[in-house]
Image (spheres, grey):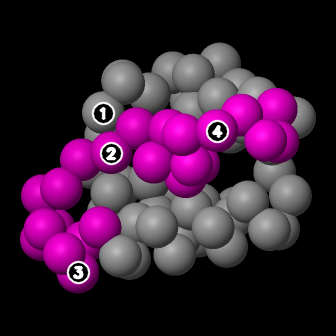
Amino acid sequence: MRESLKRKIISVCDKKIAQKGENVGLSFYAFFANKNNDPELLMEAATWWIMTHKLDHFEKAIKVKAMVQKM
């Protein structure tokens, strides 16, 4: 996973946790605007989320953040 995507995931997770608490869930779509302006990056995130780690549609932000930080 490219470094810019890692930073974005961590940033979004931090923001969601700050807004809604540690139990907040999110999907990989949370890392993108509602526009498909970077399909390669979207597919990279989807592949990591779905194919590599077989995560559910919604996962706890703290779990996702921890997984990315370990990479």
Q: Earlier in the sequence, mark 4 or mark 2?
A: 2
For the record, the magenta segment spans 16-39
- Kindly indicate whether the residue at mark 2 contacts the one at mark 1 (C-beta within 8 angstroms): yes
Residue pointed to by mark 3:
18
Residue at image coords 18%, 56%: 24
The location of residue 45, given as percent across then percent down, is 68, 39
- Kindly indicate whether the residue at mark 4 contacts the one at mark 1 (C-beta within 8 angstroms): no
The location of residue 31, given as percent across then percent down, is 55, 52
- Of the numbered discs in the image, which one, if any, rests on residue 35? 4
Viewer-side label of 4, 2: 4
Which amino acid lies under the numbered mark 2 shown in the image of this protein? Leu
Residue pointed to by mark 2:
26
**Element type where label 3 sits in the image:** helix
Whole-angstrom CA distance, mark 4 to mark 2, is 18 Å
Quarter in which the C terminus is drawn = bottom right
**Element type where label 4 sits in the image:** loop
Q: Earlier in the sequence, mark 4 or mark 3?
A: 3
- Kindly indicate whether the residue at mark 3 contacts the one at mark 4 (C-beta within 8 angstroms): no
- Of the numbered discs in the image, which one, if any, rests on residue 58? 1
Whole-angstrom CA distance, mark 3 to mark 1, is 18 Å
Residue 70 visible in the snapshot: no
- Of the numbered discs in the image, which one, if any, rests on residue 2? none
Give residue 18's quadrant in the image.
Answer: bottom left
Which amino acid lies under the numbered mark 4 shown in the image of this protein? Lys
Residue at image coords 65%, 29%: 46
Q: Is residue 33 left or right of residue 19?
A: right
Give residue 70's quadrant in the image.
Answer: bottom right
